[in-house]
Amino acid sequence: MTLREQLPASQVARQTARSLTAWTGSYLRRVVGIDACCALAAGMLAFEVRFGDHSYADAAYFWLALAMPVLWIGALALAGAYDTRFIGVGSDEFRRVVNAGVCLTAAVAIVSYAAKVDVARGYVVLALPSLTVFDPVTRYCLRKRLHWLRSRGECMRRMVVVGHPDVIGDLAAVLKRDAYHGLAVVGACVLGPDRPPLIGDIPVTGGLGNVLDVVRNTSADIVAVLACPEMSGARLRDLAWALEKTGTDLCVAPALLDVAGPRTTIRPTAGLPLLHMDHPEFTGLRWLIKSAFDRTAAVIGLLLLSPLLITIAIVIRLSDGGPALFRQTRVGKDGHPFTVYKFRTMIVNAEQRKAELETQNDGNGPLFKMRADPRITRVGARLRRHSLDELPQLINVLVGNMSLVGPRPALPDEATRYGDHVRRRLAVKPGITGLWQVNGRSDLSWDEAVRLDVRYVENWSFVLDLQILWKTWAAVLHGTGAY
């Protein structure tokens, strides 16, 4: 028995808390410092713009600018913007910052009205909105630095996973690939009769009855229970009570594949916390807004990028005398075919030579991909590197065949081999970019690419579209997975 196993639960809890707060405390101190600097900068900017003459009568606003960091940090704390659960991933942190800005603005308005204090509207209009913009931007920069540290194995939370081997392996592979989540699987408790010694490189250290011992031995600070029939409500309750004594967090994955966010709500029914799942929306006002946004952005993009588009077309024509545009039939929403437009990146007779290269396919599933495809021209390789060959698809968006964000447009022979669950990705328009674009592009396996497409279909929202568009810039600049 190790020394850690001999410790009482209270000491284990203290050690677990220290291991977690070692880096979270330092990170939160940086966040608080950034928040204070942003608040001071916004307050002084508003003071300089509104009261440039620095008259004595406006001295109160100068002191208000100096007090702005305290007010802002208090508003952020009340909004939950310092919750460690949202460190480094997701949009909850930024949403809470925006909520803090809105609530602080409303509080200033209510207090000034109730106390009959004449607050300069110009000062408030400049200070609080600018602060609500400055702070998320600086927090985003700090988050990117955290992602870099996590890519080196630092600032990670240690996780023990409970479930069946195949599901544990899938989760571990995703967390290892996307290290920015900050979760490192250090042990597995396998349920069922088959218990291999290793799942990938993760040691299997017990079963359902050994979870607490595994947490102690691995110094884990979070336990993830994956969907499995062996985990009854009573067992989960007992596990939660046991982990509470050690200060270890507990996460439970429902048996709903890739369904999250606003579609799921927990409602107590007959004393049971039932998870209700709403159907995804494929019609209505939100889709009208998405369509209007897509076509407006396509018009603006085509106008602004017209010099670049013309230049690329001329370069392709001069390189080998072939056509600049490549037209190909793809499968769109509800299985309807359409013609997609791209800049030609391969030799003119590329489709005829595809059959002789089938044995060198680097992809898996029905999608044909080659890392060193001999049909790609020199100009085409540069265009593909930064996805410039996709720009003519703005024409498809304008005419309504595609969307800016959506699943990857499928080839007809690829779509004929879809299973029922894969055909779900045809429920919406295909997109120029999507979750597949910002998560590795051609480096993804076929199963992972399909899973991302289905996840998008199940959890679409306008905010998610904006997040994907934002991340697309980084994916395009780095060129990861583009070939």
Image (cartoon, rainbow, N blue to C red):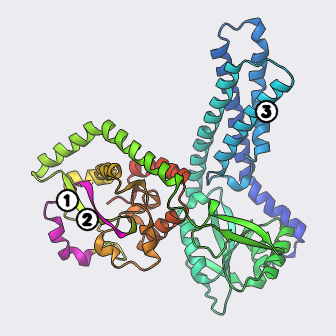
- Other residues around mark 2 within 10 Å, as few (<14) / some (14–19) / many (≥20): some
Q: Residue furthest left?
A: 321
| Residue 328 horizontal/vertical position (percent) | 24, 62
- Other residues around mark 1 within 10 Å, as few (<14) / some (14–19) / many (≥20): some
Q: Which residue is rendered at x = 46% and y = 56% of the image? A: 438
Query: Which comes before the other along the chain, label 2 or label 1?
Result: 2
Query: Which comes before the other along the chain, label 3 or label 2?
Result: 3
Residue span colored magenta: 335-360
Q: Which residue is rendered at x = 72% and y = 18% of the image? A: 120
| Residue 81 horizontal/vertical position (percent) | 72, 46
Residue kind at label 3, given as amino acid type:
Ala
Q: CA distance from mark 1 to mark 3?
A: 60 Å
306 is within the stretch colored magenta:
no
Q: Mark 3 = which residue?
A: 107
Residue kind at label 1, given as amino acid type:
Met
Q: Which residue is rendered at x = 66% and y = 15% of the image? A: 50
Q: Quadrant of residue 155?
A: bottom right
Vertically, is 185 above or below 107? Answer: below
Query: Which comes before the other along the chain, label 1 or label 3?
Result: 3
Q: Quadrant of residue 228?
A: bottom right
SS label for mark 3:
helix
SS label for mark 2:
strand
Q: Mark 2 = which residue?
A: 329
